[in-house]
Each structure stands twice: as structure tokens, then as C-alpha cells.
Amino acid sequence: MPRGYLSTAACLALCAGLGACASSQRFEAPRERLRPQAALEPATPALPAGTVTSQPLAPPPGASAAPAEPPPPSVAAAPSPAIAPEPLPPAPAPVVATGRSSVVGSWNATDATGSCRVSLSSAPALDLYKASTSGCANKDLAKVSAWDFRDGEVYLYQPGGTVTARLRQAGGSLDGALSKSGASLALAR
């Protein structure tokens, strides 16, 4: 082989190898440069830590820092001296609650023998409601264990279903009579 041929072939091989190295560096160099930069930059921006406070802004240059005076009252808002204010409507009459729920609770019962406590519960007892008494001298009234509200009247019952008394609402109280004796009975709060 001629001597020039080997040197040309060696030169071509050397140039091809150098070209491959150069092209490899050319394509990889930007990636290498980005890696250190990417490592230095955080993935999300840093948020401030601590409490956040707010304050009013400072006045613009040339303005005073004193608070502004309140605006003068408008003429339209002032009442006219020629028109007298309307009088308030009269207060409505107090509403007296009626019905079963209005009589639930504790009552002071007064009859010919004295006074005692009667409690009317909203707890059901079969088809009636539970009731209890304390300190009643009247034996029939002392036995009251249930009550009901029918046709605007309160019925007090003994065990077995005997009606002890019938009472009607009168304002904030209950007025009626004991069934056996006919003596008057009043319940007040």
C-alpha cells in the first residue's frame, strides 16, 4: 500500500473520531450546563414565614397624616321642622298561648283544702300525658297521674282513668272544679 494511502486513511479515521467526540459534546454540553443550574433553583417559589399584619397606607407625599374631618350632615337627612314624627302604634295586647303545649309545666294548685304542686309533662302515657303532684291534702288530687287537653279543657286523671278535675284556661291560669266534690280548683304558674 502506498504510504499516502495509510496516512489519508488514518487521517480520516482520526477526523471521524474527533468529529464524533465533538458532536457528542455539542449535544450533551447544554444538558450538563442545565443540571447544576436546575439544582440551584427551587421547584416552587419560597413563601414568607411568620404572621401577616396589615396597616393603613401612608399618605401620599405632600398630604397631611391627620384624619379627615367627617363630612357635614346633609340637608336631606335632617328632619323637617314642619313635619311632626308619626306616633308609634300602640303595643299589641299580650298573646296568651292556648293548647296542649301551653299548659305543660309546673303549676301551683289551690282548692278548699289548701295548695300543692301539680306538674303536667309532655311525656306520653298511653293515650294521655304523664302528670304528678306533691304536697296535696286533697286525696283525689294527690292521686293524679295523667292529663289530657280536649276541646279547650285540661282533664286530670287518676290511675284507672277516673277524671279528677276539669279545668279551662283563663288568661295565664287554669280554673275549674274537682269532679267528685264539685269544689273549685285553680292552677297558677
Image: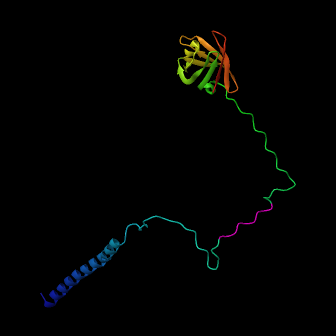
Q: Is residue 94 above or below residue 34?
A: above
Residue 111 position within the rendered picture, expressed as x and y whole percent measured from the top left: 64, 17
User: On the rendered image, what quadrant is the N terminus found in?
Assistant: bottom left
Nearest to the observer: residue 189 or residue 171:
189
Q: Nearer the viewer, residue 58 or 171?
A: 171
Q: Which residues are magenta?
A: 67-75
Q: Is residue 89 left or right of residue 46?
A: right
Q: Residue furthest top?
A: 180
- Look at the image and tell me in which quarter the C terminus lies: top right
The residue at 76%/38% (across/down) is 91
Whether residue 127 can be seen here: no
Identify whether 33 is placed above or below 174.
Answer: below
74 within the magenta span: yes
Name, please, the residue furthest toward the left. Answer: 1
Query: Exactly how many numbered labels are in the figure?
Result: 0
Q: How is the image coloured?
A: rainbow
Residue at (21% x, 80% y) in the render: 17
Q: Is residue 139 magenta-colored?
A: no
Residue 66 in percent (x, y) is at 64, 73
State the image coordinates of residue 134 (x, y, percent, origin top left): 54, 20
Q: Which is the main secondary structure of the residues drawn in magenta?
A: loop
Residue 97, quarter of the rendered image: top right
- Asked whether 169 or 77 is in front, the reply is 169
Q: Is residue 179 left or right of residue 78?
A: left
